[in-house]
Image (cartoon, rainbow, N blue to C red):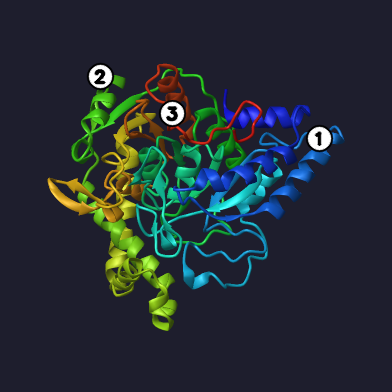
Amino acid sequence: MSAILQIAERVRSGQESATAIVERTLAALPQADAGLNAVTRLLPERALHEAALVDDIVAAGGDPGPLAGVPYGVKDLFDVEGLPTTAGSLLYADAPPAPADADAVVRLREAGAILVATLNMDEFAYGFATVNATHGTTRNPHDRTRLAGGSSGGCAAAVAAGALPFALGSDTNGSIRVPASLTGTYGLKPSHGDLPLGGTFPFADSFDDIGPFARDLTGLAIVWEVLSGRTTRLDPGELRVGRLGGRFRENADPFQLAAIDAIAPDAPFVDLPEIARARSAAFLITAYEGGMLHCDALARDPLAFDPAVRDRLLAGALLPEVLYREAQAFRAAYKAQVSALIAEFDVLLAPAAPCVAPLVKDPNILIDGARAPARSDLGIHTQPITFTGLPALAVPLYRPGQLPLGLQLVGRLHGEVELFRFAAMLEAQGIAGSWQPEGAASVDQQGALA
């Protein structure tokens, strides 16, 4: 049974208090995070206050909501009332505190969930590695000599280790799907603009989305329902499936390709047009928008930036606006072309990250036979999907004892329900499903960290 459901049912039924769950979670998180470096701030005062409010509702005979008493964390770019929103940067460590919670945090609180921590990320979400100059590198709980991926690496690592039942991250070019694949968790990038972005520190408005991580599909679906206001089903049914071909069959682990072909051996291949151009345009748009966003701060205090991030932002700020406009025009035409091309499919299968987690000491991967920096190229299969605005669900392939690998289930615009249904079928068949690394913290049946 889903850990998220277990906790909520026990709290709503009065079998266990939200306060007790939160106290144990807060006590256990520092040990669970030792060697992972996923957590940037614990929020004990806030969490215990929220837990007491949930317990008061239960005591009065009310229902606190579908996520009653469930502890969770957010990537360090969500506004948390009373705290500076740093986006993982020393530059904003002393910024004025946020006057209110981010919209998504409000929705989760109203559903009974309890925020206990903020989580590590690449500075300003610019990277696929969660190598942070201020907070350090987040490690992979399956092998701590390896990266957790990014930029939502703290979210993925905390959930994969069992330290938190779910976490809320963001995805601009793959920042949910890449770390989900490398850590063996479920992660959703929704249809662009479907989930509330209010109160989140932007990277590139054209592409930014938020989404949840969880170790089980049922729990992920519940969190998505709360955030979206929609309902889903997990029955398999009849779904029309295709396999993304062309560039999506290159630079992928053989295990991923074999899994795709075993899942849908008769499904047709779908070749998206101009993949290389789409990825280049995605790079250009995000670089330009990121550079413009930070242009004043770069001029005022460039040494306050992580050097690797600073150089990329400076390059973006120097891009001519005419190139940005051309890339946006291409994107609009491209999205219409792809929507027509995939109209007959409910689900398209593709790799997520192209390989298992790279080593922290050697953060490089092979792209077209040449070594390339993981920090920029782990999103080779996710960036073209983001470019289209389509939803994509990262699904962990079930392979205990081996390093995690994930697939992307790509849907039509607003087609998240079909993605959940197909993932449920894969989980029922034993093809998909997360597994917990040996010695990691775990959420026990009482809904507390054990």
Q: CA distance from mark 2 to mark 3?
A: 26 Å
Q: Residue furthest right?
A: 60
Mark 2 or mark 1, which has the lower sequence index?
1
Q: Are marks 3 and 1 in contact (CB under 8 Å)?
A: no
Q: Position of residue 163 (x, y in %)?
A: 54, 40
* Amino acid type, residue under disc 3 in the picture: Trp
* Amino acid type, residue under disc 1 in the picture: Val
Query: Can you say which quadrant of the picture contains the C terminus?
Result: top right
In this rendered view, identify the residue nearer to me: 83 or 106: 83
Mark 3 or mark 1, which has the lower sequence index?
1
In this rendered view, identify the residue nearer to me: 188 or 374: 374
Q: Secondary structure at mark 3?
A: loop
Q: In the image, is residue 344 above or below residue 98?
A: above
In this rendered view, identify the residue nearer to me: 69 or 133: 133
For residue 9, which quarter of the picture?
top right
Count of labels in the image = 3
Q: Which residue, given by chain and number where applicable, does mark 3 sit on?
A: 435
Q: Which residue, given by chain and number where applicable, does mark 2 sit on?
A: 265
Q: CA distance from mark 3 to mark 1?
A: 33 Å
Q: Secondary structure at mark 1?
A: helix
Q: Nearer the viewer, mark 2 or mark 3?
A: 3
Q: Which residue, given by chain and number where applicable, does mark 1 sit on?
A: 58
What label sits on residue 268 in the rendered view? Answer: none
Q: Are marks 2 and 3 in contact (CB under 8 Å)?
A: no
Q: CA distance from mark 2 to mark 1?
A: 50 Å
Left or right: 260 in relation to 110 = left
Q: Is residue 230 visible?
A: no
Question: Which residue is at 29% across, 39% downward?
Answer: 356
